[in-house]
Amino acid sequence: MPLKPWKVTYFNGRGRAEGIRMVLVEAGVPFEDIRITKQQWATMKESTPTHTLPILELEDGTVLSQSSAILRYLGRKFGMYSDNITEQYRIDLVMNMIDDLVDKILVPTLLEKDPVLKAGKMKTVEAEDLPGYMKVLTRELKAGAFYSRCQNLHCH
Ligand SMILES: N[C@@H](CCC(=O)N[C@@H](CS)C(=O)NCC(=O)O)C(=O)O
């Protein structure tokens, strides 16, 4: 039976799917970048593994869910997640921080509908959250390579 192409399914935005798309591009894996509407989501939500997006469908039809679990799966599969537990800790620390930051950014950008409240909340994120996160993330990047294929990226 011919194998199917991998499929990343998410809404039309970067959000929690962009890291998965980036890792697949870096690994050289062709994939279908499926971006669905809220109406389409309503009809498929219950059939997804954790009733959330993003999901990644593999060539044999297996569907993976939860962005961090997917990223670690891909990292292990393509040699981007170290075997060294200290390096794994650093990777996890950065992944968790980015997850927290996505939470903070998604609330004002997507969930808040009132334009005035939206602008105010975004300003708060920019002024109060982003500087601290950027400081720590910059420190971690400066501390050295994150994974064994890092020499392929401009990450030093
Ligand atoms: N921890 C999950 C969170 C997933 C999540 O909340 N996804 C949102 C989009 S960013 C979603 O599916 N929203 C639609 C819904 O919950 O019905 C992950 O990292 O994948």
Image (cartoon, helix red, strand yellow):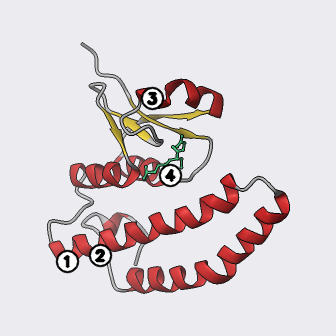
Residue 28, percent across and down?
36, 45
Real-space CA distance between mark 1 and mark 3, rounded to the nearest whole angstrom: 38 Å
Q: Earlier in the sequence, mark 1 or mark 3?
A: 3
Q: Is residue 81 left or right of residue 54?
A: left
Which element is circle 2 on?
helix
Q: Nearer the viewer, residue 154 or 88?
A: 88
What number is the disc on residue 86? 1
10 Å neighbourhood of mark 3: few (<14), some, or many (≥20)? Answer: few
- Residue farthest to the right? 116
- The quadrant of the picture occupied by the N terminus is top left
Q: Can you say whether 95 is above or below 16 in the image?
A: below
Q: CA distance from mark 2 to mark 4?
A: 20 Å
Find out whether the residues at labels 2 and 1 contact each other: C-beta distance under 8 Å: yes
Q: Could you tell me which residue is drawn at 40 percent across and 36 percent down?
A: 30
Left or right: 58 with respect to 127? Answer: left
Residue at (31%, 70%) from the top-left corner?
Answer: 91
Residue 18: assigned label: 4
The quadrant of the image that shows the C terminus is bottom left
